[in-house]
Amino acid sequence: MSEFPQAVENYLSQALRDRAHPLLLSFDAQWQLTEVSGAAGYHGLEQGGPAELVQQLQDLFLGLPLDQTQDLPFVELSDGRHAHVHLVPDANDTFHLLLLDASEEHERTQSQQQLGNQAVLAGLEKSRTLARLRQIKSELEQQRARLEEANALKNALFATLSHEFRTPLTSIFGYLHLLERGGGEGGRAQALQALRRNASHLFALAENLLEYGRSEAGETLLDAAELPLATLVDDLDAMFRPLAAEKGLALVIEAGEAPPATALFDQIKIRQVAINLLSNALRYTPKGYVRGQLGWDGALLRLEVSDTGLGIDAASRARVFKAFNRGAQHGGRGAGLGLSIVKRLVERMGGEIELDSAPGLGSTFRIALPALGATGLPALPQEQRRRGLDALIVDDDPDVAALLEVLLGDLGATTRVASTAAAALAEVGQRAPDLVLVDVELPGLSGNAAVFQLRSQGYKGGIVTVSANATEEARRAALAAGADHYLTKPLDFAQFARVVQSLGERAAPP
Amino acid sequence: MTELARKICMLGDFGVGKTSLVARFVRNTFSEKYLTTVGVKVDSRVVDLAGGDRMKFVVWDIAGKAVLDSLNQNYLRGASGLILVADGTREASLRAALNLLMQARDVLDNPACVLFVNKLDLVERWEVAPETLAEMRHSLPVFETSALSGDGVEAGFGELATRLHA
Ligand SMILES: Nc1nc2c(ncn2[C@@H]2O[C@H](COP(=O)(O)OP(=O)(O)O)[C@@H](O)[C@H]2O)c(=O)[nH]1
Ligand SMILES: [Mg+2]
């Protein structure tokens, strides 16, 4: 490269110096500053002295060789200004640091890159917002479809119910008319029997309707008490014997062993289940027998109702438990409320229902119910109780935490409480529980953050997230963070018990 | 009592929170405002180690990039530790962090590494799944952090200090 004419060289050198305000710091091999030259004033070295700058530069070159030329562009100095920092090695392990001011250049580059980066981030945010809007739209559509479906069900329910109520009422008025006209002793007895049968049927229908309404209003706790098994069986027998006799069916209702006094049940609900199963069986059995058995098997209360009736084919079997499905209508099984209510009641009591059936041969419904705890929650199965399900409650409200402790205790679980996400992580780190119950609204990091961290640290137990936020988005976020279930406040205790039980079963060793 | 000094580099895509994490660690501050980093800012903080030793962290906060260009390669020289930073709300930033780690390993000889997955306070909007991080823990220490709340920051730097001290 040929040299420029001297005048140009001078000019160039001056122009570059004017722009870069070079500052030179010279050091010995031990980082002792030996000389400062150049634009010390411009770099603010006159007030503060170079100590802070020297310390910063020493940090900057930590781990870097001091005997090689180095160029570190755009270094932010402690006063907020920027410089290109060059290291120039010299004889005897001494070296110089040359600082060229880059504040203006930095500002230009910075605002350019800022614009570029912000555009990328805004693009991301935009596509995310669009995706969220699409999601919300599809959820609204699903919700509308559900509402329409519910409305159609309700209309069909009213149509069939008016029919269902009208039939027994018609007979009642008919027989009342006969009684008023007077007649033989035989006719009188028959009329009274018919009145009783139709009245029982109406009673069962009304009970079901009430139960249906209750379910829409949300669930309450069960009513746990000692079960007078023999009395219950006698009542059922008295209720259904006339109907069976009239249809020429054999009816056997057997009382097995009574549960011990410590095993509590909700008598009203068990009665409702039995009434529905027996009246269904009698209604759809043209000939043969109907048989009911209720008894304690040492661990569970078992109710079995079998008949020699029409039977239910495999295809309809799952559907018969659905509330008021159209198929049930076409299949001629009445309003289709009865079995759906049976199933719901059984599940609320923490029990299980099974159906065995062959078309033309008859059906058998088998129900198994665990005893309830004193607060009306189904107790955990024996082996889990023995193991002692270990639950961690994460809630900052001591009243809520105490309530959950009582409920979980009643379910047979032992409990610990943590009031923040961090405390929860520490608790789980000490000893992993079978079950974690997390409130989303915690002080500081949310319950979702705690759940995410538990999962990312490999926690495999059950997690139930509880929140006051009932939106679909909140539910999705909780499940994405790793929760197994999402429950909203106010807590539905029966649902809570079911969820805890299902997770308890998962925690139990096979 | 000895004081060791170590150079640490923050490595990750832009906007993931590298500058904010350093501000939280060094000055215990946080700002919502996003100011793109150009070049490098060097900060330091002395931390106490178990056993009474102290370590001076010299933290290099450099411009965020998804790939390691020659400029950033140059900045990495002399580093003994790396803090890889990803943003939990941007899945792609996690992949970028892992890529950067692989590229950095070509430049540095067996650096101590930790991964910060940042913005834990926004966990409801995270794209990164917990299982993904559970899997990654097999190969390097992972910390969910929030520069905003400070959660995970001390623990993450502490882990790096332990690894550097060993
Ligand atoms: N909510 C939240 N925002 C954060 C967090 N960390 C950083 N930010 C924001 O994210 C943006 C980018 O942060 P910055 O530290 O500049 O990212 P860098 O490019 O990696 O240095 C800024 O607007 C920060 O306020 C965090 O933990 N939580
Ligand atoms: Mg930055």
Image (cartoon, rainbow, N blue to C red):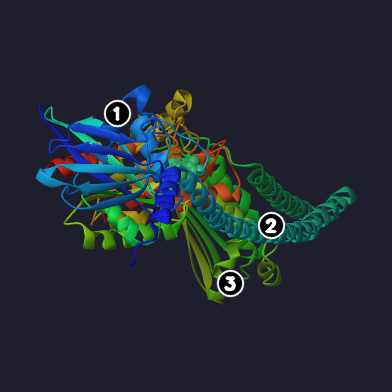
Provide the secondary structure element on which disc 2 rests. Answer: helix
A487 and B155: which is toward the camera: B155
Q: Earlier in the sequence, mark 3 or mark 1?
A: 1
Q: Where is the C terminus of chain A found, in terms of image quarters?
A: bottom left
Provide the secondary structure element on which disc 3 rests. Answer: helix
Task: Tell me the kind of residue under disc 2.
Answer: Leu
Residue B41's quadrant in the figure? top left
Residue assigned mark 1 = A50
> Which residue is at 36% across, 42% downward?
A22
Q: Where is the N terminus of chain A found, in terms of image quarters?
A: bottom left
Camera-near label (2 vs 3) is: 2
Taking the image as shown, residue A390 lies to the left or right of residue A370, namely left
The Cα atoms of the two marked residues, 3 and 1, are separated by 89 Å
Residue assigned mark 3 = A316
* Residue A140: image tag: 2
A96 and B138: which is toward the camera: A96
Task: Tell me the kind of residue under disc 3.
Answer: Ser
A257 and A50: which is toward the camera: A50
The Cα atoms of the two marked residues, 2 and 3, are separated by 31 Å
Camera-near label (1 vs 2) is: 1
Q: Where does the image place residue A167, in percent across and percent down from the top left?
A: 79, 59
